[in-house]
Amino acid sequence: MNGVARVIICVLFVSSSAHYQKIAKKRGEVSFDQYLRYQEIQDYLNRLNVTHNKLVAVINYGVSNENRNLTAIKISTGGRNRKPLIFVDAGIHAREWISPAQALYLINQLVENPNATSFSRNVDWLIIPLVNPDGYEYTHTADRFWRKNRAKGRLCRGVDLNRNFDFQWSQAGASDDECSSTYAGPRAFSEPESVALSTLIAENAHRIKLYVSFHAAAQSILYPWGYTEGLPNNGRELHKLAAQVSDAVHQLHGTEYRVGTFANILYLGSGTSCDWAYSVANVKLAYTIELRGSNLTHKSRFEIPTNNIFTVVSEMFEGLKALHLYVEWKNSPYDPFMSRLKRWSLFV
């Protein structure tokens, strides 16, 4: 072997070693200048489970079609499960990469930001950063714009998990064509991912005071209903609170989020997790938050550049502060008369 060859081999070895060390150093860390893959998300949650074991608990609540763990993280300062609970999920639709990033940012702030300890003092959190890991991984390896899970069909793969819930299933805004991107599945709750999510919600429904499902990229704060253009019983409360979230986001960078029902702002969609949480699990503050994308009129809106991730997730964190504040206040042990008075002044 000549000298030049030895030099090349040496350089390659050093380069690969440095690359390995860089990867090893970052394992279990989170960054908001890149999109994390499924295993990187798992590594981060597992690290928090070790380093902050008095505050967090990682829960494997089910298994996906392709046998990946479905994982949630509970954030609580104690209280024997008597505190009000905020339930957050993300990544139901595979191509909406910014939604798991938003959930991870929320987790990061609640657990690792010492200035955010007040957000878990009187409220518990249960957060799922990635509901659909199989579809999410597929968007990284094969089809960037894949929406569904990876269930096997007769002709085509995949079920739209956000059309698979057992409330107004397969009605307006859902398809019975398994090749459609909004295919509702062969039956309600046909998919392990939607069954596992609904089970986790149902198990905690007695104390869930707020349900939020992150999506992208319609830049909207949406509440029930999706299956009809009608309004829910507490539509006024839902709208006023959503407007407060929108205002909080706007104050940071001037971003305008639309506010309204799923059906009236976007389109009809039946069998959604938000409608199910509101109607079946009886969570009367239920929202689908469509984060902003790079372009609201083209398919590329789902491709939010990595250098925009932090802006999107940090501004929506301001909106989440408003939601948390309302849940904390509404469930506080204050004088009932004053509570009614404050609520009246806030929502008239």
Image: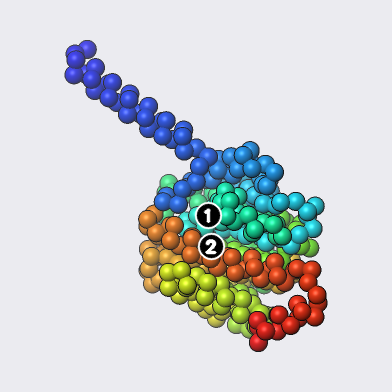
Q: Quadrant of residue 231?
A: bottom right
Camera-nearest residue between 147 and 224? 224
Image quarter in which the N terminus is found: top left
Left or right of 66 in this view: 219? left
Label 1 to label 2, Cα distance in Å? 8 Å
Identify the disc placed on residue 278: none
Q: Is residue 66 left or right of residue 207?
A: left
The percent coordinates of residue 234 (x first, y second) are: 69, 80
Disc 2 residue type? Phe
In the drawing, does residue 221 fall left or right of residue 274?
left
**Can residue 224 be seen by looking at this rendering?**
yes
The label number, if any, that marks residue 105 in the structure image: 1
Position of residue 85 relative to residue 234, above or below, is above
Residue drawn at x 50%, y 42% is: 29
Q: Secondary structure at mark 2?
A: helix
- Give the residue pinned by disc 2: 317
The x and y percentages for residue 30 are 50, 46
